[in-house]
Image: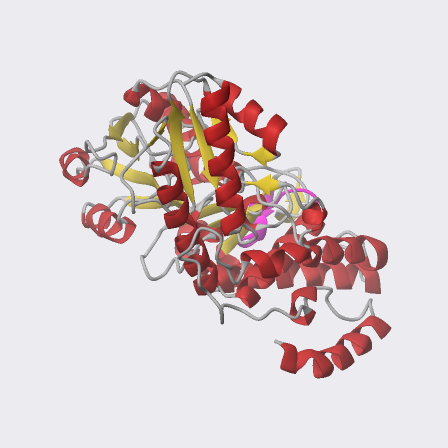
């Protein structure tokens, strides 16, 4: 991007001269970063350079601490300056409420918010911005679908399918809906290698199935099922399909139309964006059949004592003042990763996770969940005779390594595996081969410390 630096600096200076006239997201800060993307990728050795990790770490203020080894991006990713500056600039120069005022600040804020919706739609491959509903998170997006679409279209005797791979956010709302509607909730199991049992899915799928809910990338195992195949099978039975993309969107390109999803949900904070913002994608014809999720301001066309007329989609699902800065920050995060290139991110993390698998294989006490070569973005593992919480505390205290320990909001899976908890190392664009080596050395030290 170096060759664009001078022209963009000219444009940037012009924009800064009129901060209230143009969207703060029109030209994100990432365009002015001097990244040289993936021209040198010799990561086959334990400490070889990774084109993204080393080059983008300077974009993330948290890595001013050079000793920090952050391996918990599956829980929440760190934030680049591009996101922080965009949100700060909005609050400092362009803040106002949206869809209400006719004065320049409000017009500008509304334009920025609407621009953010377009960025999300393009990122997911949606047909139009109106197919994107902003929510607080993937969790709220799933609950919106359950309360709005589910309450209208799921009835007594109908069935909902979920899988053992699901995060609680894509399990509990459907469990609650099934109980309320006296519908059946069926759980698709796993094969011995912990991949989804597609044969079990086919057996449990029927004409009574109204909805199938499945993760795109499992946060407690690190790989995903064949969603395109599953969607085709579900649609043949007349069922709708909701894809939980909270983990997948940060790791590889996503196009909701390519696999014909009915619903797709994700959170911004796992995509290098702010907390408190996420989105629900649904095809427009589905959204138009759905009643509002909540009532209040900004989701109405008109209100009288006799009744209320609701706004068109997607505004009818966004009652009240939304997280305006969150939407703008999410758009900045998407533009940041898009400038790096989602294909480049996928290639970078593929090399890293293979390196992680090989490094863990050298430590006898470590038992990864799943076969080597299958993981994407993360690896969960147990450590002989040491509770994950104790292990994670040791790694943090002694080596400044941040990993996640627990059930990862997937208790049905761990109950099935008869494991109380695991340790999870998860990757982001800023991770390097050195991070993997430090983790390996820390785990070897843990083996000595816990007297193996």
Q: Position of residue 430 (x, y in %)?
A: 57, 52
Q: Residue 170: name its quadrant.
A: top left
- On screen, residue 47 versus residue 22, left or right, reads left
- On screen, residue 125 versus residue 374, left or right, reads right
Can residue 297 be seen here? The reply is: yes
| Nearer the observer, 268 or 304 | 268
Vertical position of residue 106 compared to residue 243: above or below: below
Residue for point 72% across, 53% down: 84
Q: Look at the image and tell me in which quarter the N terminus lies.
A: bottom right
Residue for point 50% across, 37% down: 439
Can residue 27 be seen here? The reply is: no
Q: Position of residue 153 (x, y in %)?
A: 35, 38
| Nearer the observer, 273 or 364 | 364
Q: Position of residue 246 (x, y in %)?
A: 47, 44
Q: Position of residue 413 (x, y in %)?
A: 33, 26
- On screen, residue 51 versus residue 208, left or right, reads right
Look at the image and say whether residue 53 sits in the magenta stretch.
no
Which contiguous range is marked in magenta? Answer: 308-321
| Nearer the observer, 107 or 279 | 279
Q: Residue 202: name its quadrant.
A: top left
Residue for point 31% across, 18% down: 418
- On screen, residue 257 versus residue 296, left or right, reads left
Residue for point 71% across, 56% down: 81
Vertical position of residue 104 compared to residue 307: above or below: below
Look at the image and say whether residue 317 sits in the magenta stretch.
yes
């Amino acid at each position: 991007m170096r060759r664009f630096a001078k022209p963009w600096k000219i444009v940037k200076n012009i924009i800064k001269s009129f901060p209230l006239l143009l969207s703060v997201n029109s030209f994100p800060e990432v365009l002015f970063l001097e990244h040289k993307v993936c021209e040198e990728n010799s990561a086959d050795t334990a400490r070889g350079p990774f084109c993204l990790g080393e080059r983008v770490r300077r974009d993330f203020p948290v890595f001013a601490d050079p000793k920090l080894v952050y391996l918990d991006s599956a829980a929440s990713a760190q934030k680049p300056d591009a996101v922080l500056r965009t949100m700060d600039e909005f609050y400092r120069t362009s803040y106002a409420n949206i869809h209400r005022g006719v004065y320049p600040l409000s017009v500008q804020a509304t334009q920025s918010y609407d621009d953010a919706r377009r960025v999300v739609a393009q990122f997911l491959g949606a047909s139009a911005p109106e197919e994107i509903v902003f929510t607080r998170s993937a969790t709220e997006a799933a609950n919106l679908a359950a309360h709005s679409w589910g309450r209208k279209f799921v009835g007594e005797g109908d069935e909902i399918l979920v899988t053992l791979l699901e995060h609680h956010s894509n399990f509990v709302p459907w469990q609650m809906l099934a109980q309320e509607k006296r519908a059946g909730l069926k759980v698709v199991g796993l094969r011995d290698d912990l991949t989804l049992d597609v044969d079990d899915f086919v057996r449990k799928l029927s004409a009574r199935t109204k909805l199938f809910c499945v993760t795109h990338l499992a946060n407690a195992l690190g790989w995903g099922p064949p969603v395109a195949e599953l969607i085709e099978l579900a649609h043949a039975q007349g069922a709708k399909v909701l894809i939980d993309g909270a983990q997948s969107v940060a790791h590889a390109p996503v196009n909701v139309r390519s696999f014909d999803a009915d619903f797709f949900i994700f959170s911004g904070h796992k995509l290098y964006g702010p907390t408190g913002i996420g989105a629900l994608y649904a095809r427009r014809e589905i959204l138009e059949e759905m009643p509002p999720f909540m009532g209040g301001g900004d989701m109405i066309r008109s209100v009288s004592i006799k009744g209320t007329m609701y706004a068109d989609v997607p505004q009818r699902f966004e009652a009240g003042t939304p997280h305006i800065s969150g939407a703008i920050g999410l758009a900045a995060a998407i533009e940041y990763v898009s400038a790096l290139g989602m294909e480049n991110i996928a290639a970078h993390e593929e090399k890293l996770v293979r390196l992680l698998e090989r490094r863990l294989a050298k430590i006898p006490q470590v038992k990864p969940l799943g076969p080597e070569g299958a993981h994407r973005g993360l690896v969960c593992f147990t450590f002989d005779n040491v509770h994950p919480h104790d292990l994670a505390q040791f790694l943090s205290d002694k080596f400044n390594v941040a990993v996640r320990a627990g059930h990862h909001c997937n208790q049905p899976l761990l109950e099935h595996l008869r494991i109380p908890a695991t340790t999870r190392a998860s990757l982001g664009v800023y991770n390097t081969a050195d991070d993997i080596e430090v983790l390996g050395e820390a785990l070897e030290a843990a083996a000595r410390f816990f007297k193996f």
